[in-house]
Amino acid sequence: MNTRKTVVFTFVLAVTVSIASLIGCERVQQIAQPTVPLPEAISREILIGAVYPITGHSSLAGSSVEYGIELAVAEINNSQHSDVKIKLIMEDGQSTVGGAVEAFNKLIHQDKVSIILGPGSSSQVQEAFPIAHQNQVVAISPTSAASGLSAVSDFVFRTNLTTDVLIPNGVRVTQEKLGYQKVATLFDNVDLFSRTSDTELRKALMDNGVEILTTESFQTAETDLSAQFTRIKASNPDAIFISSTVGDISDILVQGRALGIPSDIPFIVNLTLSRDLVEAAGDAAEGTITFTSWNSTTDTPGNQAFVQNYSTKYGMEPNIWAAQFYAALHILAKGIADAQSTDPKAIAAALAGIRDFDTILGTLSFNDVGDAVYDPIVLIVKDGEFEVFE
């Protein structure tokens, strides 16, 4: 990226964060009024629920999430700079909407938690966040990205960047570098994230003067995409954009190359890729570009220490899922510490007021609807490893 582009991007980001800081005050004002009696001060271990995919279609991310959570909790509980102490109750979201709803209801009504970390997918968040709102429970989703889901309640937040941030930035960066003029898109028409991503993507492409030759769809866990890829290949695109779930993406990349999509036509994936997915796809992942919110090599505050500590403890480098849940717990701990209370209204107000907080994701603020604001990243797979696309 040349100097002029860097200056312009930095200026736009600064204006965006400034606006977010101003309008974010509205959410703080809406929930900051103290209740009677006053919220309970921090004087004991805080019970937090965690909902993530231990089983089911997206369970590939489950163990990484668990490790990221475990590492964050240990750091928070052993910190000498805060009196926040966390005890977690883990629940399986089962990679389904029904599983996430069941987990939320159990945590709220049986375990009596007032804070929930999760769920992971946008489809789950769409149904689970209203439950948090109805029960005035704080919920913070580390990995969902479909735009518009946090506005449902002042009690809900998301720390992943949303599609309306990731996709326009990603299209701008990749189109400038690759110069593609005509593309194809492929998306999961069942999954909420995939549907909204494709809609956002087509808008961004048209705004950048890119012709969309064909838009193909499939259903979650569909195993044969030969008809879709045959039509895509026949349209002769310069690039292929894919919007999919975690569980499907590796197979999609493998099928696409096996069905004759040449390696000089790049796959550009709206879903954040992880090292696990790249390894599963093997050579088919080579050259794939992804729009994301975190990278293991960036020098964001504490990131290299996190990567080293995680790698030392678990014998592997962390992926995006571990990083996002790890970061979300530290952000949540800051909200609790700032609130100096276990009352969910006070914690929600404190989270809404977070500005320029240093995290492994970058310097983070929340905007007026509870979505995180920080710098997006574009990565490309080269020799099986992620590199910044520039």
Image: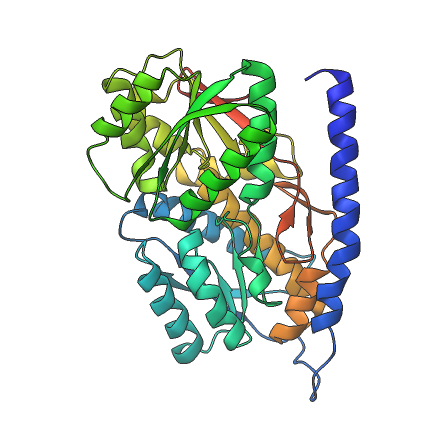
Q: How is the image coloured?
A: rainbow
Figure check: 26 above or below 299: below
Q: What residue sits 65% from the left and 35% below the top? A: 300
Residue at 44% in and 22% down:
183
Q: Is residue 215 left or right of residue 380?
A: left
Q: Who is closer to the viewer here, 268 or 201?
A: 201
Q: Is residue 390 visible?
A: no
Look at the image and tell me whether residue 331 can be seen: yes
In the rendered image of this protein, does residue 113 appear above or below residue 318?
below
**Residue 169 quadrant:** top right
User: On screen, 265 above or below 40?
Assistant: above
Q: Nearer the viewer, residue 56 or 2?
A: 2
Occupied quadrant, residue 40: bottom right
Residue 387 in percent (x, y) is at 52, 21
Residue sitting nearer the eye, 268 or 102: 268
Can you give x and y, in whole percent of width and height, for residue 282 in the image? 30, 22
Q: Nearer the viewer, residue 54 or 205?
A: 205
Q: Is residue 221 above or below residue 185?
A: below
Residue shown at 45%/38% (left/top)?
198
